Amino acid sequence: MSPTLEEGRFVFVTLDEGAAGDPGVRATVLEPEGLSAVICQEAADRLGLEYDFVAAWITLRIESSLSAIGLTAAVSNCLTAAGISCNMIAGLHHDHLLVPVESAAEAIDALEALSASAAD
């Protein structure tokens, strides 16, 4: 899976439509309550946005099909066993995990162990 820890700290916020173009925005989902976004913590602070979960961003560098079965479950089970909460975002080319910033190193270790066991 080649999990890679991205640089920075990330938060979930609700944005006004005009703020979606801010360079700190990394992902968005339009929900009935508004535009949910994952944004760099520094940008959220600059924009005066409220948040309560600060995350590390891990990218799985393996290209996986959007129709593949089991990857999300395997990753979720692995991190659950390690006691790490995880929010996943599927991109066209990679899967992305947002884990508590204080658990980033432990999450990388767990994902690398999962990847090694799958290779055996």
Image (cartoon, rainbow, N blue to C red):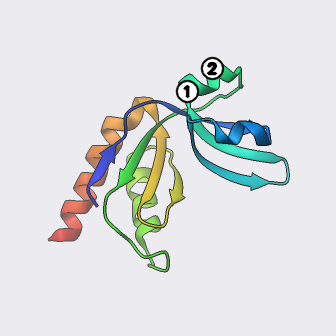
* Location of residue 57 in the rendering, given as x and y in whole percent from the top left corner: 44, 42
Viewer-closest of 113 and 101: 101
The residue positioned 65% from the left and 50% from the top of the image is: 28
Above or below, comparing residue 34 to residue 100 in the picture = below
Q: Is mark 2 on a helix, strand or loop?
A: helix
Identity of the residue furthest to the left in this view: 120
Percent x, y of residue 63: 34, 68
Q: Name the residue under label 1.
A: 41
**Rendered-image quadrant of the N terminus:** bottom left
Q: Residues within 10 Å of mark 1 (few under 14, many from 20)?
A: many
- Amino acid type at circle 2 is Asp
Q: Residue 54 placed where, x, y %? A: 54, 30
Q: In this view, does 30 lie to the left or right of 71?
A: right
Q: Dot 2 surroundings within 10 Å: few (below 14), some, or many (20 or more)? A: few
Q: How far apart are marks 2 and 1 (CA)?
A: 6 Å
Closest to the observer, 30 or 87: 30
Can you say whether 13 is above or below 63 in the image? Answer: above
Q: What type is the residue that disc 1 sits on?
A: Gln
Quadrant for residue 8, please give it. top left
Which quarter of the image is occupied by the C terminus? bottom left
Residues at circles 2 and 1 in contact by the CB criterion of under 8 Å: yes
Q: Which mark is residue 83?
A: none
Residue 21 coordinates in the image, percent (x, y): 65, 41
Number of numbered markers: 2
- Residue carrying label 2: 45
Of 111 and 2, the residue lying toward us? 2
